[in-house]
C-alpha cells in the first residue's frame, strides 16, 4: 500500500472514530446541564456555579444561561429593520451592553469546552418593533404571518450574532420582563397543541434543528406539563429530530413534594431531559438540609404506592425507555423570589453533584455516588459517612411531613414558599387532617434527630461544622413554627379557643427561638420573615394577630 493511500485511510478512520466532521455539531450525550436561576429583578446570585470551570469539574458538560442572559435580549434586529434599535438610542445602548456581557460569558464557557445553551421566553420582541408594526394585540400568536417572520428572524440573528451558542431552551408557560426594560412578551393559547404548541414547534424545529443543526430544548412547564393528551398530540404531530429534546420536571406542576410523578416522562417519540431543582424554592433554597437527589433518582416515598406499570423514578425512566433519555439539567441555585439567601452552598452542592455524576452513567446506584460525595468532597471517614447518609435521608422525610403529608393531604402546597409563611389550610378530609397533625409531630422529631446527627459527625473543619449544625437547627426551628401554625389552624377550625391560645404561645416561642439563629451561628442563611406576602394568599402572622384580638 503506497503512502498516499495510507494517509487517506488514516483520515477516514480518524473521522469515523471522532464522530464529527467539519460543518457538523457533536453534542454531548447524555446532556448534563446546569443553570443558575437568578431572582428576577434582583442582582444576580454570586455563586461558584456561575463559573463553567466549577460545574465542569462537578460532571456537567453544558451550561444553560438564564432568561436575562439570553441573546434574545441582545440582538440588533438589523436584518429586519435598522430603525427597530437605532444606534445611539437608549434601547440600542442597553442591547449592545447586554451583548458584550453575554459574549464574555460564552467565551468562558467555550474555553472550558462546555456546550452553551440559553433559556428564552417566547414570544419576546423589542417594544419598538411591536409598536412600529402595530402588532400589540397579535404578536403572541405564532400563526400570524408577521409573528412567524419575526420569530424566524430572531432565531437567525441569535445564532449569527452569537455563533458559540449550541442551542436554545424555550419556554412559553411564563414571561418574565423584570430585567428586560425594552422588550415585551406574550403568548396566546399556551396550553393548546393545535393553536400554539405544534405551530411554534414546527417553526423552531425548522430554524434551529434543521437549518442550523443546533439543539432545541422545548420546555413543557406550565403549558403542557400535566396534560397527557396534549403531550401525545404534540408528539404525534412533530416528527422526531436528533436535535429536538423535550424538557420535563420530574413531578407534575412545580417543584413540590407529594405531587404526582410526571405521567409524561417516558411517553411519546421525543427524547426527554429532566429538570431538577437543587435548592428548592418551596423548601428553604438550601438554608437547611434537604436531600432530594435520592428521591429523584430512586423514587420518593410518596410515589411508592403507584401502580407497578407506571414509571415512578428517573431510574425507571432510563431503564424502561432508554432511547428517550436525553439527560438531566439542574438548577444548582435559584427559583422563586427573594430569600432565603444562603452563605454556604453545601446542601445544594450535594444535590447538584450527585445528579450530575449519576446523569453521566445511570447504571450507578445513588448510594454509591452519595458516599463518594461524602468522602471526596466533605472528607468524611468511617462511621461519619453513614451518619451523614442518615442525616440526609431523614431530611427528605422531615421536609415532606412538615410541609404536607406523604399522602398529599394538603392541596394548597403554596402555603409556605420563598422566605414567607402563609396560613395553612386543613387537609381535604378528617382522616387526612389526622395524618396532617401527626406528621407535623413526626417532622419535628426527625429534625431533632438531624440536629443530633450533625453534632455527632467529625467535620473536616470548624466552618463546615458550624454550617452543618446551624443549618440543621435552622430546619428544626422553622419546622417548629410550621407545626404550631398547623395545630393552631386545626384548633381555630374547630372553634377551640383554648387550643388557639395554647398554640399562639408555642408559635411565639418558636419564632423567638428561630430569630436567635444568626446570633448563635454566623453562617446561617437569611431568615424567613413574618411580614412576607409575595405570592402568598393569606399571611400567617396576620391571621395569628387577628386570632390574638379575638382571645
Image (tube, rainbow, N blue to C red):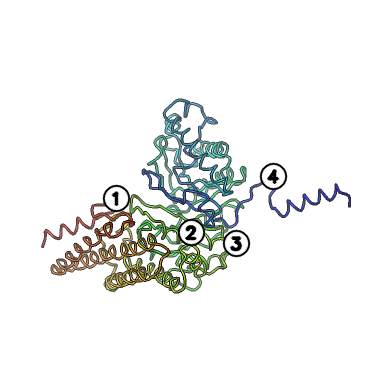
Q: Nearer the viewer, mark 1 or mark 4?
A: 4
Disc 3 to disc 4, how far (Cα)?
27 Å
Residues under labels 3 and 2: Cα distance?
21 Å
Q: Nearer the viewer, residue 230 or 213?
A: 213
Q: CA distance from mark 2 to mark 1?
A: 34 Å
Which residue is tagged 2?
A: 229
Query: Which residue bears the numbered disc 1?
Result: 534
Q: Nearer the viewer, residue 265 or 344?
A: 344
Does label 4 or label 2 sit earlier along the sequence?
4
Considering every residue shown, the one lying at the far right of the view is 1
Instruction: From the top left corner, tell me how far across and down residue 542 is, in percent.
Output: 19, 55
Q: Along the polypeptide, which appears first: circle 1 or circle 4? A: 4
Looking at the image, is 372 positioned above or below residue 127?
Answer: below
The percent position of residue 234, horizontal first and vertical second, equals 52, 54
The numbered dot on residue 22 is: 4
Q: CA distance from mark 4 to mark 2?
A: 41 Å
Please tell me which of labels 3 and 1 falls first in the chain: 3
- Whether label 1 touches label 4, CB < 8 Å: no
In this rendering, the label closer to the viewer, 3 or 4 = 4
Residue 262 location in percent, x, y? Answer: 46, 62
Mark 4: secondary structure: loop
- Could you tell me which secondary element the residue under label 1 belongs to? loop
Query: Label 3 crowding class (10 Å Cα cut-off): few <14, some 14-19, many 20+?
Result: some
Residue found at the very far front of the displayed protein: 461
Instruction: State which mark lies toward you, 4 or 2.
Output: 4
Q: Nearer the viewer, residue 296 or 304?
A: 296
| Residue neighbourhood size for the residue with mark 1, other residues' Cα within 10 Å, grouped as few (<14), some (14–19), many (≥20) | some
Amino acid at each position: 500500500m503506497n503512502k498516499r493511500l495510507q494517509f487517506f485511510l488514516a483520515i477516514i478512520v480518524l473521522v469515523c472514530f471522532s464522530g464529527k466532521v467539519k460543518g457538523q455539531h457533536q453534542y454531548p450525550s447524555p446532556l448534563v446541564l446546569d443553570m443558575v436561576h437568578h431572582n428576577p429583578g434582583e442582582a444576580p446570585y454570586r455563586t461558584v456555579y456561575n463559573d463553567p470551570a466549577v460545574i465542569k469539574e462537578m460532571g456537567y458538560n453544558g451550561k444553560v444561561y438564564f432568561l436575562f442572559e439570553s441573546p434574545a435580549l441582545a440582538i440588533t434586529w438589523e436584518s429586519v429593520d435598522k430603525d427597530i434599535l437605532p444606534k445611539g438610542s437608549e434601547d440600542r445602548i442597553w442591547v449592545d451592553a447586554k451583548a458584550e456581557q453575554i459574549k464574555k460569558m460564552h467565551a468562558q464557557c467555550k474555553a472550558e469546552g462546555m456546550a452553551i445553551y440559553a433559556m428564552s421566553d417566547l414570544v419576546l420582541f423589542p417594544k419598538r418593533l411591536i409598536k412600529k408594526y402595530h402588532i400589540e394585540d397579535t404578536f403572541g400568536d405564532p400563526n400570524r404571518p408577521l409573528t412567524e417572520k419575526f420569530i424566524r428572524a430572531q432565531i437567525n440573528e441569535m445564532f449569527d450574532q452569537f455563533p458559540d451558542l449550541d442551542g436554545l431552551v424555550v419556554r412559553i408557560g411564563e414571561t418574565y420582563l423584570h430585567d428586560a426594560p425594552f422588550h415585551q412578551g406574550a403568548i396566546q393559547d399556551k396550553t393548546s397543541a393545535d393553536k400554539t404548541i405544534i405551530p411554534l414547534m414546527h417553526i423552531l424545529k425548522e430554524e434551529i434543528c434543521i437549518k442550523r443543526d443546533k439543539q432545541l430544548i422545548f420546555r413543557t412547564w406550565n403549558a403542557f406539563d400535566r396534560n397527557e393528551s396534549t403531550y401525545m398530540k404534540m408528539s404525534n404531530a412533530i416528527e422526531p429530530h436528533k436535535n429536538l429534546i423535550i424538557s420535563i420536571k420530574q413531578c407534575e406542576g412545580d417543584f413540590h413534594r407529594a405531587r404526582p410523578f410526571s405521567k409524561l416522562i417516558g411517553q411519546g417519540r421525543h427524547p426527554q431531559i429532566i429538570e431538577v431543582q437543587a435548592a428548592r424554592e418551596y423548601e428553604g433554597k438550601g438554608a437547611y438540609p434537604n436531600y432530594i437527589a435520592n428521591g429523584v433518582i430512586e423514587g420518593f416515598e410518596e410515589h411508592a404506592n403507584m401502580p407497578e406499570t407506571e414509571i415512578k423514578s428517573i431510574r425507571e425512566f432510563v431503564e424502561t425507555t432508554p432511547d428517550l433519555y436525553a439527560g438531566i439539567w439542574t438548577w444548582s441555585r435559584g427559583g422563586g423570589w427573594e430569600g432565603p439567601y444562603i452563605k454556604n452552598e453545601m446542601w445544594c452542592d450535594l444535590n447538584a453533584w450527585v445528579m450530575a455524576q449519576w446523569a453521566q452513567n445511570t447504571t450507578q446506584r445513588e448510594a454509591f455516588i452519595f458516599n463518594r460525595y461524602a468522602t471526596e468532597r466533605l472528607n468524611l471517614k468511617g462511621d461519619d459517612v453513614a451518619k451523614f447518609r442518615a442525616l440526609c435521608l431523614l431530611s427528605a422525610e422531615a421536609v415532606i411531613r412538615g410541609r404536607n403529608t406523604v399522602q398529599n393531604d394538603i392541596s394548597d402546597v403554596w402555603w409556605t414558599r420563598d422566605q414567607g409563611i402563609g396560613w395553612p389550610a386543613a387537609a381535604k378530609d378528617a382522616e387526612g387532617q389526622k395524618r396532617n397533625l401527626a406528621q407535623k409531630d413526626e417532622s419535628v422529631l426527625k429534625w431533632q434527630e438531624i440536629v443530633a446527627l450533625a453534632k455527632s459527625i467529625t467535620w473536616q473543619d470548624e466552618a463546615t461544622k458550624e454550617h452543618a449544625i446551624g443549618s440543621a437547627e435552622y430546619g428544626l426551628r422553622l419546622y417548629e413554627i410550621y407545626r404550631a401554625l398547623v395545630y393552631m389552624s386545626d384548633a381555630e377550625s374547630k372553634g377551640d379557643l383554648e387550643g388557639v391560645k395554647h398554640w399562639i404561645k408555642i408559635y411565639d416561642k418558636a419564632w423567638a427561638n428561630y430569630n436567635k439563629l444568626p446570633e448563635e451561628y454566623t453562617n446561617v442563611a437569611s431568615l424567613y420573615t413574618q411580614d412576607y406576602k409575595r405570592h402568598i394568599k393569606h399571611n400567617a402572622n396576620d391571621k395569628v394577630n387577628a386570632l390574638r384580638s379575638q382571645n
